[in-house]
Image: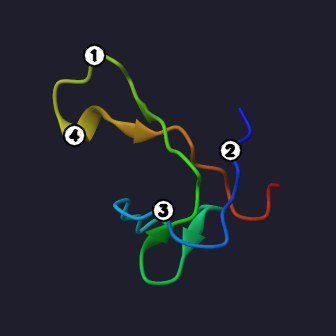
């Protein structure tokens, strides 16, 4: 699933994962959209951003 990388932050999404291709200084995310999984998580420790791509992997 290829997600478009925007030139500006995705407002309302905070990201602190500086090793992600979509990370922007200031703890911003530049992914056009994000996907969080799994569907049946019961707390935040069980969730992951499946949009993550290791920086430089594009």
Image side of residue 10 versus residue 3, left or right:
left
Instruction: Give the class, few, some or many, for how many residues have Cα within 10 Å of label 4's Cα (few <14, many ≥20).
Output: few
Identify the residue under disc 1. 40
Residue 36 higher or lower than 57, as above or below: above
Residue 10 higher or lower than 3, as above or below: below
Image side of residue 39 versus residue 24, left or right:
left
Q: Quadrant of the N terminus?
A: top right
Q: Residue at x 70, y 50 (%)?
A: 4
Alpha-carbon distance for marks 2 and 4?
Answer: 23 Å
Alpha-carbon distance for marks 1 and 2?
Answer: 23 Å
Q: Which badge, 2 or 4, is on the more N-terminal residue?
A: 2
Image side of residue 5 versus residue 17, left or right:
right
The image position of residue 5, as x and y in percent, is 69, 58
The image position of residue 18, as x and y in percent, is 53, 71
Residue 50 higher or lower than 28, as above or below: above
Identify the residue under disc 3. 10
Secondary element type, mark 3: loop
Secondary element type, mark 4: helix
The image position of residue 37, as x and y in percent, is 41, 29
Q: Give the camera-side residue of 15 and 5.
A: 5
Q: Which badge, 4 or 3, is on the more N-terminal residue?
A: 3
Identify the residue under disc 2. 3
Q: Which badge, 3 or 2, is on the more N-terminal residue?
A: 2
Q: Are marks 3 and 2 in contact (CB under 8 Å)?
A: no
Instruction: Give the class, few, some or many, for how many residues have Cα within 10 Å of label 3's Cα (few <14, many ≥20).
Output: some
Secondary element type, mark 1: loop
The image position of residue 58, as x and y in percent, is 83, 55
Identify the residue under disc 4. 44
Mark in the foreground, 1 or 2: 2
């Amino acid at each position: 699933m290829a997600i478009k990388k925007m030139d500006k932050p995705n407002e309302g999404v905070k990201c602190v994962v500086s090793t992600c291709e979509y990370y922007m200084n200031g703890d911003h995310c530049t992914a056009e959209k994000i996907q969080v999984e799994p569907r049946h998580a019961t707390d935040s420790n069980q969730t992951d951003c499946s949009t993550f791509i290791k920086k430089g992997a594009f």
